[in-house]
Amino acid sequence: MSMTATAGRAHADPHHIGLVVEHPGPAPKRTVTAYGFWVFLLSDIVMFSCFFAAYAVLADQTAGGPKGSEIFEQRNVAIETVCLLLSSFTCGMASIAADVRNRFWFYLGMAVTCMLGLIFLAIEFREFADLVARGYGPSRSAFLTSFFSLVGCHGLHVSAGILWLLTMMAQVFAKGFRADVLRRMMCFALFWHALDIVWVGVFSVVYLLGSGV
Amino acid sequence: MLGKLDWSAIPFDQPIPLIAGAVVLVAILAVLIWVVVKGHLPYLWHEWITSVDHKRIGVMYILLASVMLLRGGSDAIMMRIQQAVAYQSQGYLPPEHYNQIFSAHGTIMIFFVAMPFVIGLMNLIVPLQLGVRDVAFPTLNSVGFWLTATGALLVNLSLVVGEFARTGWLAFPPLSELSYSPGVGVDYYAWSLQISGVGTLVAGINLVTTVLKLRTKGMNYLRMPMFCWTTLASNLLIVAAFPILTATLAMLLLDRYLGFHFFTNEAGGNVMMFMNLIWAWGHPEVYILVLPAFGIFSEVVSTFSGKALFGYRSMVLATMAICVISFMVWLHHFFTMGAGPDVNAIFGIASMIIAVPTGVKIYNWLFTMYGGRIRFATPMLWAVGFMVTFIIGGLTGVLVAVPPADFMLHNSMFLVAHFHNVIIGGVLFGAFAGFEYWFPKAFGFRLDERWGKAAFWFTFLGFYVTFVPLYVAGMLGMTRRLQHYDVAAWRPWMFVAAAGMAVLTIGVICQIVQLVVSIRNREALRDRTGDPWDGRSLEWATSSPPPVFNFAFHPDVRGEDAYWDMKLSAQQQSLDHAAPEYHDIEMPRNSPTGFTCAFFATIMGFALIWHIWWMVILGGVGAFATFVVFAWRDHDEYVIPADEVARIDRINLEERRSLVSMAGTI
Amino acid sequence: MNLLDPQGPVAAANSTILVDSVFIMLAIVVPTIIAILGFAFWFRASNPKARFQPDFVYSGRVEMVVWAIPALTVILLGGVAWIGSHKLDPAAPVPGTGSPLRIQAVSLDWKWLFIYPDQRIATVNTLTVPAGAELNFQLTSSSVMNVFFIPQLGSMIYTMNGMVTRLNLRADNEGKLQGLSAHFSGDGFPDMMFDVNVISPLAFPDWVAATAKTDAVLNEDSYKKLMQQGTEKNRLTFRLDDPRLFDLIATQHIPPGPGPELLSDAGRPHSGGHDAR
């Protein structure tokens, strides 16, 4: 149903700017999926920024309890950071393997990513358990509340990511490198990398800045 | 075993909620039994409940909103009556009950009436206006709707199992903290909004991606209908603002469930932080609601004036300006918290600045009417009623944006009148206008004009009779949320407001009668061509209702008012072209994912509220399993063969030839 | 409680700004509404005299005017807002005759406590002040948020636990006024209305002396009793033991007030919340 333009169209271009690039039509599925997932990631970053803001507001409210510098162990944080950064690399390898339809390297990349993620979570869980055992849990002070929440929110996202990772491995195992599986893998990779970026923010704001207090 | 839940949760000793609950339960059971006995269940399941068609989902959103309007409206009637009689008396609603009612009223009206109504209209119409077959993520669309329904279900469940929050619709701490609200009320509130908030976010992501990435050939941004622009702005706001609500409610829930100290009085919690966070969401929220209404009015005023929208580009600019500025004004909700003169003044000025693009829109609608040939069908009545009413609401809004004025009017009945003025005059009138305007498109027959006009006049009049007295009461010093009062000067105004509610109720009844009468007379009101109003945008190029695939061919657009152009050139070419070549069309398969996910979300929500931990885990596992099952699907699309497409399309083309041959009478 | 009948300079200034702003805006709004109704009526389809101009969809001149009208109004009102916010900041001093009176207000569930630290007395749900004197309020809350508001005297201000807000007022005429809480705070919220007695500055010291003769003493113990949730029908008066009581409350040395004694859904009395460590 192509119709040509007719006269009396002053309102389409009142300033007579002239060159109009015609929109080609709806975007392909892969583009649409990636775009939507980016929008979701942006919304997730907004949510994280609320926890960052809460941390900034409440960081001084130690209520007689410990300050950040008294409880942060920089060595653990360094190991966690290395794990997560490495896992982003291995996730990238898995993505490339998926693009070239190489099962072995895909499974390997994903497995190592999973391992590194689990190590990260284990260290973080131990840090939390240790603090709680010493009476420095999140209900001790507003500072500790905001610390546990910000770091914990990131940890929850990593946990969800690992669940997703395992599901992706199962998907490839069951369905192969089908188009929809590849789209989901693309979204997973975006998610995993985004978590890495958020972690950079977390350790900078919480651990690095906090240790100077 | 069942956490905090036991028989004392059911209000056997309170007749009002008990009887209301019983009546609703009987009504629901009656409908369910009728559906099953008449054999409609398979149809409902396959065609509606598991549908991923944006048109069906849009209709279900609007249905949810309409039903919730009755619930929220009943709360309002109860409140008006209470305030009319509770002078030097406790009235008929004790504080514990009254406080739940106004909290539920606000929560339901914003989250389960206004939001679903506008999201429903956007879902229904935007893909049609963009000339495409569906939204970007159809199954996710279904998930979003059903999660919203879950939230509505949980709020209403609180009427008969447990209690609702007694904190107002925004649950400010410390009152909403566990020490001052130890019951399950705030938990019902928070979990219900968390779950439906996920649904809203999903809708936001969907519609943003649809508008930005799924438009038909030739539809550049500056050729989109105004409703699509306001959809874009509103959904950008959803994506940016709803995560703030999610985070803030999560913080409150962490305080309540795990003893955290975000907002507690003890251990360094900060109540002011809640105010900032919740209003950083809350202000964009009201623009999320009103921007689609503005878009509806742009369509309606333009169509019924027989003219293209005046100043299209400046309308686009104004819309995006409102979108951005709405994020910069949140502090005006708590000028009286003591932020200091500089901060107060800056936010006050920013709040006024947002009145500039809004004013521009009003003038552009005004000049759209200028030089038009205006037909006063019901949608146009709503539009003119909106323009007059919304300006007054905007005036009072700019008034309370002046901090010294707000120092006298904050939290008063004047404020209550202001926000009802803009929400009813803007959002509700817009929803009704959209409902009247697009009903024929959705269902294939028009609504009865006489009852539609009656609904308008009663609602319009009822609004003023109800809310002008509240403006007066606010000027007489009356604050909001009073379960009883002793000040004689306020009493006559409360009486008038209660009388106004009666008029508003007649308006709502007229809407219901309109629906019943129209369904009965649907053959006489049939919309055969798909273009009952002589429309200008692409949704009117489809049949009423459109086929599942919307368009047999993606339209090729050359300017604004794409469909108007088509009609003009069709008149000139008299549709004498060779029969087009039809192709197979792939459409997404229906899926029970949305409904099932919401089912488990309901279980999880209920279990979280009542601390039934094993049930929480069950619900969570179920929800995850639902997604895994969905991910394992092998066939996510089905094919409509070219012959079938041709058959469906030809019927509509035939009807339209008769329309085109009537050129000149349009 | 009429906002348009101010009894003090703060309320008078706020109300003046309020009324002026309304009239400024009406000057725009009324002609616009007339234009809306006028155009709607004139350009109705059944009017043969109206000229149909389907191509009138853009006009630079009209655009300039329609952006200018709201912008100019906003610039004017913005100036009013800037100047007004500074002059009428709640903490801005309000000079008066005689010596300033310090009043420390505490919102409780569900009553108002007014402490006169310099006079060593305190009252509940009633406030007596001398006409014409500068009134320096310091406000806090024992538990949840409230808002202190005397409509005919002026600006309202939040009260929050652990924080002190400030408000300066002056009552110019003798008489009886009313105040209330303007922020919902729970089941007893409607009963948080309080009397404001504005008396002659000459009679004020006598009132203080008479009030100080009361048997009731306000100290930490009697304050903790006041903190229990409940409304207070009577106008209580106290002698003030410790003039630093307000500071103890505002800095949370006296912990925040308790919530309701909940008979939970299982019929067991609830402790009412988490223990703070």
Image (spheres, coloured by chain):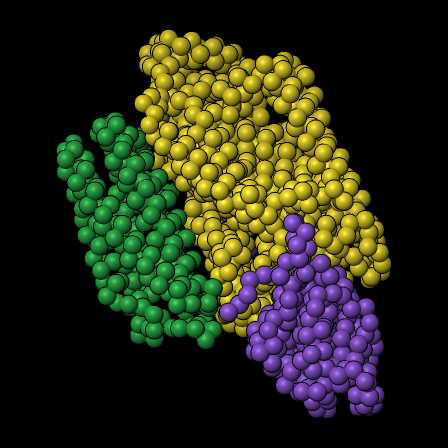
Chain colours: A green, B yellow, C purple
Left or right relative to C17: residue B556: left
Residue B14, by quadrant, is top right
Q: Residue at x 30, y 36 (%)?
A: A167
Residue at image coords 73%, 39%: B18
- Figure quadrant of residue A178: top left
Total numbered labels: 0
Return the residue nearer the eye: B226 or B208.
B208
In-image side of C218 versus B335 (left or right): right
Question: Whole-percent x and y of residue C234?
Answer: 82, 72
Q: Is residue B560 above or below residue A68?
A: above
Q: Residue furthest front?
A: B1
Please state the horizontal and vertical placement of residue C74, each as a whole percent of the image: 55, 60
Q: Quadrant of the C terminus of chain B?
A: top right
List x then y, in percent, for residue B204.
44, 41
Q: Looking at the picture, how far across and down is residue B380, in whole percent?
A: 62, 33
The quarter of the image holding the N terminus of chain B is top right
Residue depicted at x 77% and y 73%: C125
In terms of image quadrants, where is residue C242? Answer: bottom right
Q: Residue at x 79, y 88 (%)?
A: C212
- Frontmost residue, C56 versus C119: C119
